[in-house]
Image (spheres, rainbow, N blue to C red):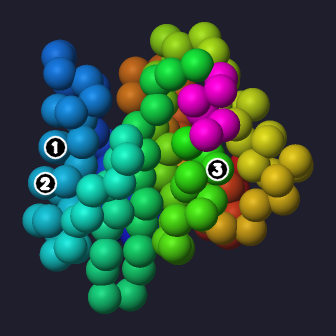
Amino acid sequence: MLPLLEKLISVKKPVSGLPGSLLAQYKAIGEADGYRVEPLEKGLLFLGKTSRVALKVEFGNRWEFFNTITAMRETDSDIKVLVKSSNSKSITMETIYTVLKKKLEEETRWVLIDIEGKKEPMFLNFREKSQ
């Protein structure tokens, strides 16, 4: 797995200032790993020599989640990372995973992260760790 992904997954939920403080942590990780980091709406784009990773943070309602997924699908990146909270009851990680895999037949690699730490990250289209 890409070292950047391992570091992004290990980030703990900040005490306050969501989502800004969370994005600041992610940005610092990307820059420390040598990525050029560009802002996206609700997220960041990490531009490396051999990889492009789009990350978005979404805590909104079902409609906002689908808008975020649509925007991420249009982002030119090798890996897409969606960060959500399991405390948000609008849509579960399992539902997002199923929509990406079965309904949208997504072929790009995706990582779904629960910032609360209650659920393990979900990986779509990763050979070494696919669910």
Residue extending farthest to the bottom is 49
Left or right? Give the position of 81 relative to 38: right
From the viewer's perspective, tell me whether residue 99 is left or right of residue 59: right
Whether residue 63 appears in magenta in the rendering, the answer is yes
Circle 3 sits in a helix, a strand or a loop, which is it?
helix
Q: State which quadrant residue 96 falls in.
A: top right
> In the visual, does 49 lie left or right of 97?
left
Q: Main secondary structure of the magenta part?
A: helix
Of circles 3 and 2, which is in front? 3
- Please name whichever residue, 32 or 100, is drawn nearer the observer in this view of the structure: 100
- The magenta stretch spans which residues? 62-67
Residues under numbered marks 1 and 3 in contact, where contact means CB atoms less than 8 Å apart: no
Circle 2 crowding by C-alpha within 10 Å: few under 14, some 14–19, many from 20: few
Q: Which mark is residue 5?
A: none
Residue appearing at x 64%, y 50% in the figure: 70
Q: CA distance from mark 3 to mark 2?
A: 26 Å
Q: Position of residue 29 (x, y in %)?
A: 18, 56
Front residue (pair 59, 74): 74
The Cα–Cα distance between marks 1 and 2, rounded to whole angstroms, is 6 Å
Camera-near label (1 vs 3) is 3
The numbered dot on residue 28 is 2
Which residue is located at x 42 percent, y 45 percent?
56
User: Is the residue under label 2 in contact with that under label 1 (CB below 8 Å)?
Assistant: yes
Q: Can the viewer see residue 9 in this picture?
A: no
Q: Residue 41 appears at what percent x and percent y?
A: 37, 47
User: Is residue 3 left or right of 99 when viewed as pictured?
Assistant: left
Q: Dot 3 corresponds to which residue?
A: 70
List x then y, in percent, for residue 117: 41, 25
Task: Look at label 3 and name its amino acid.
Answer: Thr
Q: Kindly give the residue lying farthest to the right in the view shown.
A: 102
